[in-house]
Image (tube, helix red, strand yellow):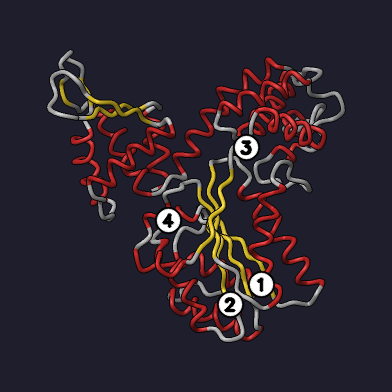
Amino acid sequence: MANVFEEVVKEYHLFKNRDALSPHYIPPELPFREEEIRLLSQKLAPILSGKKPENIFIYGKTGTGKTAVTKKVLSDLNEYAKKKNIPVLGLYVNGRLHDSEHKVLLKLVRLLDPTQDLLGYSTSAVYDRFLEFLESGGIRVVIAIDEIDMVKRASDLIYRLNRSNDELSRSSVSLIGISNNPTFKDRLDARTRSTLCEVELVFKPYNAEQLRVILEERAKEAFKEGAVSDDAISLAAALAAKHSGDARYALLLLLRAGDIAEEEGAERVERKHVEEARRLVEEDIVYEMIATLPEQHRLVLLALSTLRLKGKGVSSFSGENVITSGLLYSYYTKIAEEYGVSPVSDRWFREYLNELDTYGIISVKVAGKGFRGNTRIVELNVDPRRLLQVVKKTL
C-alpha cells in the first residue's frame, strides 16, 4: 500500500514562502509605520542612558501594526543594548496566552532565565524572584504586554509592575500596554491610574493604497514570480480597506486565496480566488475575535446565544419573539454567577453592548411600539450554535 502522505503532502506550485502571509510574520520593513517606530523609539531611548522611560499605552484597531512595530522596536533595542554592553532588555508577553497576573510574571521570569521553573509557586514568590533577577544584574527592562485587556485583574498586574520601581535601586521596570480597546485605561481602578504616568500612541487604520503596497511587498516574499495577479492584490486591499483598514485581514485574504488557487491547480491567484476567500476569512476572523474578547463580553454573548437557542424572549408588538436588554442583563448576571464571576453594573453592561454592536457581532436598536420608554432590543448577527461552542471553549 502506498504511503498515505504521498497524496496529501504536495509541493506548492504557487507559494514560495507561505509563512510570509501569516499574521505572526514580522517583515524586515514595516511600510507606513516609520513615524510610529520613530515615536516609540524616542520614548524608550532614555533607558539606554540609565533613565526610566515613561509607561506607554498603544491603541489601534486590529491589523494596524501595533504588535509588529512593538516587536521591531524591542528587537532593535535589545540588539543595540547588547552591542553597547548596556544592561537593558525588552520583553514581550502575549496577554491572550498569559491571561493572569501569575501567568505573566511566570513568563517574565522564564524570559529572563529559561532554567527557572516556578510552577506551583505563589504569585508573590514569582514576583520576588523576578525582582531578584533584575536587581542582581542591574537590568532595566521594558515589558510589552500585548492584548493587555485580556489579562484578568489587569489593574493588579499593572500596579504591581509599576510600583516595583520603589523596590529596585539598580534596576527599573517600564511598561508598554497594547490594546484594541481605547477605553481600556478607563476600566483600571483609580489607584492604578494614579501611578501610571503614561504616554499614549494611537495607530490609525491603513487606507486602500497603503494596503496594496503592503500586499505587493508580502506577495513578493510569499509567492513565486507571476503567481498572483495585480487584480487579486488590488481587490484584497480594497476589501481590507472597507474592513477598518485591517492589514491582517488583507494578508489572510491573500493567503486563503492562494490556498484555493493551489487546490484548484490554477496557474496563478486571480480575483475570483480572493472573492471565494472572502467568506471564509470573514467567518474565521469573527469567531477568532469572539474567542479573544474580554471575559465579561464573552459572558454576555454566552447569555445571548443561550437565550436565542432556547427560544426565550419577549413578545413584540408584531408578535415576534425578541430579546430585550433588560432580559439579557438578568440572564447574563445568572450566567456570570454560575462561572464564579462578579457581574458588572447595568451601566457597564450597556457599554459592553455598544462595543459588541460596534464589532458587528450583535445589533442593538430601540424597541419602538409596544415597549415602555427606551427599551432596547438585542439581535445576534452570527450563528448562535457556533458562538456557543466558541465561547464555552474559551471560558
Residue at image location 66% in from the left, 72% down from the top: 47
**Sequence-earlier tag: 2 or 1:** 1
For the residue pair 392 and 152, the one nearer the viewer reads as: 152
Q: Which residue is mark 3?
A: 248
For the residue pair 264 and 192, the one nearer the viewer reads as: 192
Residue at image location 78% in from the left, 67% down from the top: 80
Question: How would you rate the neighbour count of disc 4 (Cα within 10 Å): few for under 14, some for 14-19, many for 20 or more?
Answer: some
Secondary structure beneath label 1: helix
**Sequence-earlier tag: 2 or 3:** 2
Instruction: Measure the alpha-carbon separation of dots 2 and 3.
Output: 34 Å
Instruction: Measure the alpha-carbon separation of dots 4 and 1.
Output: 24 Å
Instruction: Measure the alpha-carbon separation of dots 1 and 3.
Output: 32 Å
For the residue pair 186 and 1, the one nearer the viewer reads as: 186
Q: Which residue is mark 2?
A: 172
Q: Which residue is mark 4?
A: 185
Coordinates of residue 321 in the picture (x, y in percent): 20, 21
Instruction: Measure the alpha-carbon separation of dots 4 and 2.
Output: 22 Å
